[in-house]
Amino acid sequence: MQTGTISVTSENIFPIIKKFLYSEQEIFLRELISNAIDASTKLKTLASKGDFKGELGDLTINIDIDADAKTITIRDRGIGMTEAEVHKYLNEMAFSSAEDFLKKYKDEASIIGHFGLGFYSAFMVSDKVEVITKSYKKTPKAVHWSCLGDPKFTLENHARKDRGTDIILHLSEDSLEYLQNDRIEEMLHKYCQFLPVPIQFGTKTETSYEGEGDDRKEIKTEVANIINNTEPAWNKKPTKLKDEDYKAFYNELYPMSTPPLFWIHLNIDFPFHLTGILYFPKIGNNFELQKNKIQLYSNQVYVTDDVKEIVPEFLTLLHGVIDSPDIPLNVSRSYLQSDTNVRKITSYISKKVADKLKDLYKKKEDEYVSKWNDIGVFVKYGMLSDEKFHDRGMKFALLKNVHDVHMTIDAYKEKVKENQTDKHDRIVMLYTGNAQEHTTYIKDAEAKGYDVLLFDHVIDNHFIQHLEQKLGDVTFVRVDSDIPENLVQKDEEAESVLSEKEQDKVKLLFEEALGEENKSKIQLKALSPTAHPVVITKPEFMRRMMEMQAMQGMENSGMPEMYNVVVNSNHPLVAEKLVNMRSAEKKEKFATYLYNLARLNQHMLKGEELSEFIEESIEFLK
């Protein structure tokens, strides 16, 4: 038996590894299984080249728990190691010093793998680690390596006959949670779900039936519990996959989820290697529930679901898998942001997504339009956050009006510019966030020949301002806001049936109805007799400011609500009934009623005021 000291310059490297990586302690299983995968795939490569003449046999990797002995064993039938290779790979660790090590990598979530330290992750959870290994080569004997978590080790021959490696972890007292089957199965599912070599963890019972009728028997059989899919869909050629295959893989990634809208299969070899499948999920109003669903892999080894340094922010709404060996996995985020390959990958994915959307809109417009409520959120988010995607998105971003008619932005501008261009040559796009709430205003606008868009998602406030800024020749006005005067051509041509003196008296009546404390502006307009007698509108800029404050939790900012009261001097209730009332008291009361009727239409009457209005309405009916 040999004894020796692992070649490290710091006597304290093992406690440093254990303490430094404690927050991601469970990563040890991924690293040790990854080593077993490497050993197995290397053997297959040697066999394919003729350098290994023996039988490959079953290369399944086994994970065994012995609760009594407090051990976990990771067993493979890969290439194994000779005594010389054990010395080389297990007994030499090249660090300049522990201090430099910590200083350089103190901000990293995980450094294992980048330095070939995967094996030493075992000491994060173990007081003792044993390695029993035999090389695929015929002459060398098997060897047994053992270490108690300090630089000292023992090495001796072993009676093992078959090739491969067993790594036996003697768990420390603070790591006994890993003796629980459920805990290990959870980690295997997280890190090893798509590794390319079968991984067995215990057995499972399969039920089959034999015979028919009364003679039918239930047969239970114990079979190997293989926890991974060795040939995931993203590694297959798109031509070999049907829609059902993509949907089945989505369900494998996100069990019991709503089926995706559609997907993109990524496959590129130059100037970097990348494969994957990105799915467009059904997106609701809660962005955060949809984010961080893209899983990052490196050669089928799970790495993380935090990919915001690799894909643009808006793409984090997608679900699926990205697999690339060219992404530096164990370096700082600042390095990721400046890395050339990462920037190329980010640009590539963004372009592929835009190309997919453009192609779908061009070739399957009806299908695209039918899914716009979900696609639209993603497209708008992309245009808001990515300059290049905005330019590309102009070809497939749609505007939808209250009658569910969809058009691209440029097509819609052409549709409405003749009738909805103001004196500054800006196209005025009218919109509503709630078609039912604004029914009266929509009807009035459409009566004038205007079109009204529907923007009813939380992202739309930002998207409207974004389009105004980017396009320059467009302004958005909510349908219950003050419509620019020069647009109301039909109203301007109309004449009031009231004299100027009568109009002054009507205005005074409404000023009294509002009261001195109300600073709202009263306007008399000669609108259509079929329009409402009184309409309340709000300045667009003021309404937007109030909404932005509300989104930031500043509803009680102290700013008074400002709005305009537009009195239709041509409506019979104003021009005939109100003007011809003899009692000053009745005139004031009726003006107040018409004003409150307009407030009711804007959902501004609440509580006691609403109750009083209802009672007053009953009196009027009597």
Image (tube, rainbow, N blue to C red):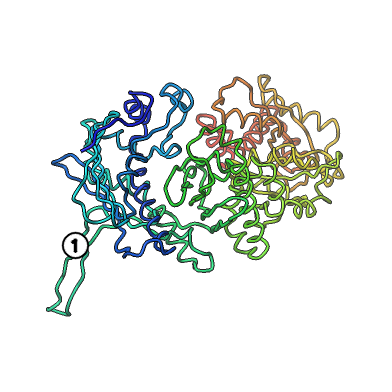
Q: Is residue 84 left or right of residue 270?
A: left
- The residue closer to the viewer here, 30 or 185, is 30
Q: Secondary structure at mark 1?
A: strand
Amino acid type indicated by mark 1 = Glu
- What residue is pinned by disc 1? 222
| Quadrant in the picture for the C terminus | top right
Please rate how many residues cluster around mark 1, counting C-alpha atoms within 10 Å: few if below 14, some from 14 to 19, many from 20. Answer: few
Residue 547 percent across, percent down from the top left:
61, 32
- The residue closer to the viewer here, 475 or 18, is 18
| Residue 259, above or below 579 | below
- The residue closer to the viewer here, 121 or 110, is 121
Q: Is residue 588 left or right of residue 483?
A: left
Residue 123 percent across, percent down from the top left:
30, 34
Q: Quadrant of residue 229?
A: bottom left
| Residue 441, above or below 105 | below
| Residue 472, above or below 231 | above
Q: Residue at x 33, y 57 (%)?
A: 198
Q: Residue at x 37, y 61 (%)?
A: 52
Q: Is residue 323 left or right of residue 131?
A: right
Residue 92 percent across, percent down from the top left:
37, 35
Q: Quadrant of residue 613?
A: top right
| Quadrant in the picture for the N terminus | top left
- The residue closer to the viewer here, 230 or 145, is 145
